[in-house]
Image (cartoon, rainbow, N blue to C red):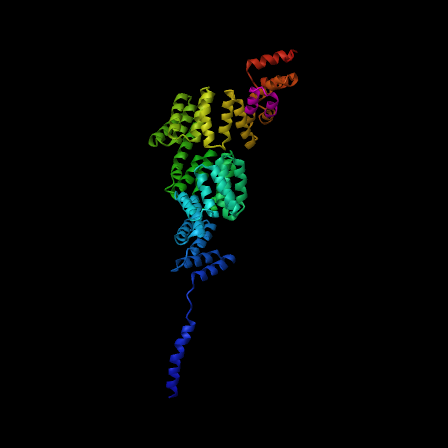
Amino acid sequence: MTRVILCLALAFVAPAALAQKKPTAATPEDLMQQAEAKSAAGDVEGAIELLRRAAALGGASGEPALRLGRLLESRFELDSAIDAYKGAAEKLSGAAKGEALGRLAVAQEMRGSAEAAASAEAAAAADPEGVWTKLAMSRARARAGKGEEALALASEAAAKGGGAAAVCARGFANEVKGDLPAAEKDYREALADPDAKVAAGIGLARVLRKSGRAAEAEPILAKTIEAAPGAVDAYKEAARVKIALKRPDEAMGDAATAAALAENDPEAQNLAKEVAVAKALASVAAGQIDDAIRDLTTLRDQNPDFTDARVGLAKAYVAKRQIDAALAELQKAVELAPNAAEAQYQLGYVTHVLKGNPAAAVGAYEKAVAAEPGNVLYRTNLGAALTATGQHDRAVAELQKVTTAAPDRAEAWIYLGQAHLGAKRYKDALAPLEKATQLAPQSDAAWAYLGWTYFGLKDADNFKKAAGKAKALGYKEPTLLQYLQRIEAGEPIK
């Protein structure tokens, strides 16, 4: 009887005990709390796994996916971050949805996805005043060439606590506006933040290349690619840096990687053709001009709308002194792509320097500067053409921008002094021309213009020194040499 009672008691007690020991299922909120603790302790892998579990639970909001996206993006796992942000955006609303879409746009841009602009617009619809909306829209506007709008949006993002990402966006906006010194400063500031180092590294490398410092850009890009092997823009820029360094064979690998990573990115797909142009122009430099013309003609015929092939072919024709053929290619290039900065510049250069018609070159130079305002070479040649056509005040305005942005560019100081000299502003001409002779002491033109400046100031002693230096360097213009002879003989400047 006792055994029966004991069995009955166990039958009632055991289920109750088992029920007490059965674990309670973790909620998304529990898993997010655990993930936060692991992340704070440095276990990012564990945090990511917990957030994946939380996001996959039935009834979970978009918050776990948003947090997951942030962690993945911090590790530059861009494809996985993009998927997480998409999942988050589907479930969230308001400010959280705006953040998910804004972050999505930035990650897609870095990944070379054409969807980035649409994601930015969707972020603006979800949360017009959100910091990530401002950041995404700033970068989208910069991509579209709207530097002023981009700068305003980046400034708003910074005011809302956008941190290094906002500084980086400001750098991009300044770059598009053509203020390369300001862009470089912004990118270097943002580079110190681990979360912004990839975008900032790519931007800084691009500015350094545009500033003629491609060698400085190369190691920055190597570190950037190591940190974020999926960042398409890093490979694009690495290819262009190697082209600038006259190593087109090495550029081909980066171009191929960019094209493979971003199959729907036209810019990435065109990179291989840009490298082909660079390789052909390397043949020109090696004296194999006919081979280059043949290769570039084939590339042009296979891709008649690819303006770089026409510009490259024009350069090869110039090397062969076939100036009219070069002009024909350049005119077709700017017809196909009126905003192609290099095509417009080369058209201006051939017209100005090789055809001797600076007045006809001004328009092309202006379009080149408008398309790429930070390019000091384009602006310098525009200033030279304006000076040659007697538009001295306009020339001064353009050239002062160059000497501010690139104070070591000797030819800009020469043309600036020449512009003041042409306007008979002798005192204003003196400082730039003295600077020019310091930067380019072997330039006979700089010494000649300085001589004419002293002539205008009726300073015979300094005229003789400057004009004499020009003569010693091989200056042949007869008027200056005749005056030098007369003043050396004792005739005063009247």
Residue at 39% across, 80% down: 10
- Return the x and y of residue 260 as percentages of the image width and height: 38, 43
Q: Nearer the viewer, residue 353 or 13?
A: 13
Look at 41% across and 41% down and name the residue there: 258
Q: Along the horizontal axis of the image, is 400 left or right of 121?
A: right
Q: Nearer the viewer, residue 26 or 236?
A: 26
Rendered image quadrant of residue 450: top right
Q: Quadrant of the C terminus?
A: top right
Which residue is situated farthest in the bottom direction here? 1
Q: Is residue 427 magenta?
A: yes
* Left or right side of 78 for 471: right
Q: Is residue 291 visible?
A: no
Q: Which residues are magenta?
A: 414-432
**Res. 192 in view:** yes
Magenta stretch prevailing secondary structure: helix
> Where's residue 434, x and y in %?
61, 24
Residue 148 at what x, y percent from top left?
48, 37
